[in-house]
Amino acid sequence: MRVSLDGTFELDFFEIEELESAEQYAKETEGSIYSWKTTGNSNWLEKRLSIVDVLGLAILPKNLPEWIDLPDDGE
């Protein structure tokens, strides 16, 4: 699923259960898998697989940082 954040940033999003599809898509697009982490109102992307506090998985280009802040809930 393609997700837009405030119309300025788009990413491909996968549910945790779709890990195999996410890995295949990352390979096909030469991208990296990021875990979309969330606690309380805070949201961020981490360049690694994780299941703790994870909303889902995002596929992004490989040249991005290890950690990407996202808008907090309610902003």
Image (tube, rainbow, N blue to C red):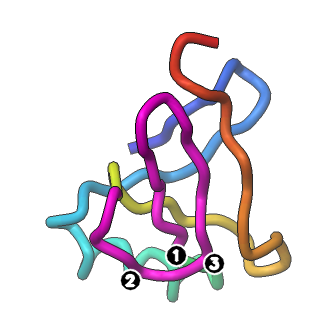
Q: Are marks 1 and 2 in contact (CB under 8 Å)?
A: yes
Type of amino acid under label 1: Ile
Type of amino acid under label 2: Glu
Q: Mark 2 or 3 closer to N-term?
A: 2
Instruction: Examine the structure image and report whether residue 22 is included in the region drawn in magenta.
Output: no
Residue at 28% in and 74% down: 21
Q: Nearer the viewer, residue 38 or 28?
A: 38
Q: Name the residue carrying label 3.
A: 31
Q: Residues within 10 Å of mark 3 (few under 14, many from 20)?
A: some
Q: Name the residue carrying label 1.
A: 33
In the rendered view of the protein, which quadrant contains the N terminus? top left
Residue at 61% in and 76% down: 47
In the rendered view of the protein, which quadrant contains the C terminus? top right
Q: Mark 1 or 2 closer to N-term?
A: 2
Is disc 1 placed on a helix, strand or loop?
Answer: strand
Q: Residues within 10 Å of mark 2 (few under 14, many from 20)?
A: some
Q: Are marks 1 and 3 in contact (CB under 8 Å)?
A: yes
Type of amino acid under label 3: Gly
Q: Nearer the viewer, residue 1 or 55?
A: 55
Residue 5 point in image, percent of width and height? 63, 28
